[in-house]
Amino acid sequence: MTHSPRRRSAGFTLLELLIALAITASTVALVFATYGVIGRTEQRAQDIIARTEHIQAVHNWLQRKLEGARLISRLEAGAVVLFFNGNPAGALWVAPLPERGPGGGLHVIRVALDRHADGTVDWVAEALPYDGALMQLDWTRAIRTPLAQGLRTLQWHYLDGQTGRWVQDWPSHRAYYPSRIRIEVADVQGPWPPLVFALARAR
């Protein structure tokens, strides 16, 4: 009598099934980890783009206002002084708002720090309609424009075109503008690229 060989079962053994499940689980975990890395990378990229766009918007806003600065005098303690002064924390000058169009008018613009009770510091611009050399600067009536929140560092520097020196104080009794302004800013996310402006009406 001839015995035919026994056929092996077509199913999986328990060991093979466990190995297959382990491989599948590892693959799924790797796929989800990859998607997580991609998601975080995309979020970081979006944050960088948003931050860059914000810095550029602040630069453009300041550039328009500084390019429009007017060489206007005012009375201060009985003396005639230039309606422009600056210190390490900010500056004050006169420029039109808006820059173009029939609705514009001269405004006194002040860019400075806004300190809160919780210790946070914001960067804001304020504007008052220019009302002549004898106007009183009541900043409670000012139009406020927020520039940045959570500042860590803010330093204004002014280039004296006559001496070629950078200074951090520009008193109003000088008879001319600085030729350039450089602003160094850092917020909770780190330092900004330096903001540099040439004053078109510098004398």
Image (cartoon, rainbow, N blue to C red):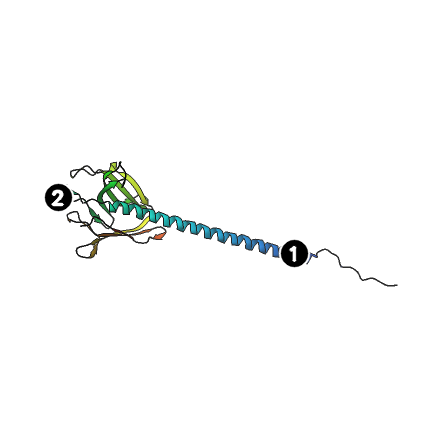
Q: Which mark is residue 80?
A: 2
Label 1 amino acid? Answer: Leu
* Marking on residue 93: none
Work out which quarter of the rendered image holds the N terminus and state it. Answer: bottom right
> How many numbered circles are shown?
2
The tag earlier along the polypeptide, 2 or 1, is 1
The kind of residue on which mark 2 rests is: Val
Q: Callout 1: 10 Å neighbours few (<14), some, many (20+)?
A: few
In the rendered image, the residue lying farthest to the right is 1
Tell whether 48 sits left or right of 155: right
Instruction: Give residue 91's position: percent from left, percent from top.
Output: 23, 47
Q: Residue at x 54, y 52 (%)?
A: 32
* Circle 2 Cα neighbour tier, 10 Å, few/some/many (<14 / 14–19 / ≥20): some
**Nearer the observer, disc 2 or disc 1?**
2
Measured Cα–Cα span from mark 2 to mark 1: 90 Å
Pointer 2 with pointer 1, Cβ within 8 A: no
Taking the spot 55% from the left edge, 55% from the top edge, the residue there is 30
Instruction: List x then y, in percent, for residue 4.
Output: 83, 62
Q: Position of residue 173 (x, y in %)?
A: 15, 47
The numbered mark at residue 18 is: 1
Query: Image quarter for residue 139?
Result: top left
33 with respect to 200 (left or right): right
Q: Among all residues in the image, which is located at the extreme bottom?
A: 2
Query: Residue visible at 61% across and 57% down?
Result: 23
Residue drawn at (58%, 55%), measured in percent from left and top?
A: 27
Q: Secondary structure at mark 2?
A: strand
* Residue 161 falls left or right of residue 149: left
Task: Pick whichever, 162 or 142, lies toward us.
Answer: 162
- SS of the residue at dot 1? helix
Residue 122 rendering spot, x and y as whole percentages: 31, 45
